[in-house]
Image: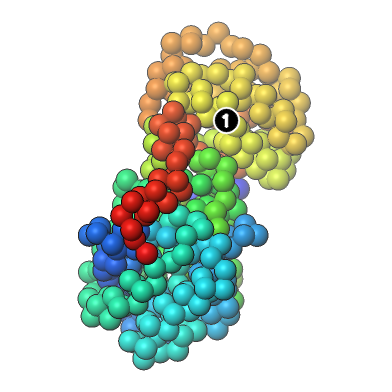
Amino acid sequence: MPPKHDNEPCDARIPFNVITGGVTAARGFRASAVTCGIKNPEATRLDLALIVSDSPTVTDAVFTTNKVRAACVRVCQQHIKDSDTRAIIANSGNANACTGVQGIQDAKAMTKAVAEQLNVKMRQVLVCSTGIIGMPLPIQRILPKVPDAVAKLDAAGSDDAMRAIMTSDTQPKTFAIEVPCGDGSFRIGGIAKGAGMICPNMATMLCFITTDVKIGKNEMHRAMHYAVEKSFNCITIDGDTSTNDTVIVMSNGASGLPAIKRNSPEFDLFRCALHKVMLELAKMIVCDGERVTKFVEIRVRNARTQADARKVAETVAKSLLVKCSFNGSDPNWGRIIHAVGYSGARIREELIDIFFGGLLACKGGLATKTPISEMEKVVKEPKFTVTIDLNLGTSGYTVYTSDLSEQYVDFNSSEYSAAIHAKRQKGFA
C-alpha cells in the first residue's frame, strides 16, 4: 500500500455525523438574506446575506493572495485583528473591487449599518462581496435593507444566506457535521460560493464556517490554516485567483464543552473535523465549476518531497491541454507526462507510472497494453481519478480539478461588456 499522502482527508480518524443546518448548524448562530437589486434593481433574487453569532466569538480568516484586493477584503483585514467578530454581511452581484476610496467607504458603511442594528462595534462586523470587478457598489440600494436582514435573522436561515451569495453558481454549497467529544459534542457547518476563477492559493470564492467549540485565538489560527491549506488550496478550475477570496471561521463556545487546548486529542479532533467541512465545500466548488463536465482527482504518489508532489499535481491539474482531453473523454497520458516534465519537480522519466482509475496507462514512461476502450470508460465518467506515481520517494499530494469546455469559454467571454450594456440600456444608476 502506498503511504498516506500529505493532504489526504483525515476524516477516517474521526467519528462524525452529517447534519443539516449549514452555517447555522452550530449552536448560537442565526442567518438571513434579503433582496436589494444590487446587480439589477428589477431582480427579485436574494443578494444580501447576514450571519450573526448571539455571543462573542473567536474568529479567524484567510484572504486572497492577489495583490489587487477588493475593498471588502481590505476592511476585513483590519477588523479581523480584534478577532471578536459578531457578524458577517455579504453581497453578491458586485465585487466592490477596483472601486477606489469610495469602495472602502461603502464597505465600511455596510459594517456600520449592521453594527448599529446589532448594537455592536463596527470592527465586530466583517464584510464580503462577490460579483463583477470594477463597477461601483450600489450602496444606496443596500443600506436601507440592512434592518430587514437583521429582523429576519433565524436559526434556520442558512439556506437563504447561501443562495444570496451565489453568482455563477448553479448548485448550492453547504455542509455540516456533529462530532462526539468527551461528554458532549460540537458542530461545524458552513456555506460557500464559487464556480469560476478557481485556483490554489485561494480562489474566487467566499466561505463562511461556524462552530460552537470553545477555542483560543492561536489554536483557531493553527487549525484553520491547516484546514485551508489542505482543502481550498488544493483545488483548481481555470488557474485564476480572484480579488475577493475569503474564508472566515467563527467559534462561539456554545457547545458547553471545555476549551480546546493546543496539542490535545481534542485539538486534533477539531482540526480534522474542520478540514472535513472545508474539503467537502471545496469539492462542491470544483464540481460546480462554470460549465465543467468532469470532476478529476489528481493524485501524485512517491515523490521525493511533498513540494515535488505538489508541483506535479498542480501543474497537471492546471494544464489546458490536459483539461481539454478530460473534456473530450480522451485518456491522453502523454499530455499528463509532458506536464509532469515541466512542473519543476525532480523526476525520472523512466520511473513514472500513470493510472486512469485503477488502469495502468503508462509504466516506466512507456505505453502499456491496457486497451484504450477500457481507459475511455474511466474518463467518460463525470468523476474519476488520475494517479501519477513518481517512484522516487514516499511523499504525495492531491489536487482536485475539472475539465475545460467550450461552454466555459462562451460563458466567460463577455461578462463585463454585457453588464455595462444592460446597465446603460435600462438607465440604472
Q: Which residue is nearer to you in this view: 207 or 122?
A: 122
* Left or right of 90, for residue 198: right
Percent across and percent down for residue 160 are: 26, 63
Q: Can residue 179 be seen in this view?
A: no
Residue 29 coordinates in the image, percent (x, y): 32, 76
Determine crowd level at label 1: few under 14, some 14-19, many 20+ residues with C-alpha closer than 10 A.
Answer: some
**Residue type, label 1:** Leu
Secondary structure found at label 1: helix
Residue 124 placed where, x, y %? Answer: 46, 83
Q: Can residue 145 be seen in this view?
A: yes
Residue 345 drawn above or below residue 63: above
Q: Tell me where residue 177 sits by quadrant.
A: bottom left
According to the image, label 1 marks what residue? 320
Q: Residue visible at 32% across and 45% down?
A: 170
| 350 or 119: nearer the viewer | 119
Q: Residue at x 68, y 40 (%)?
A: 311
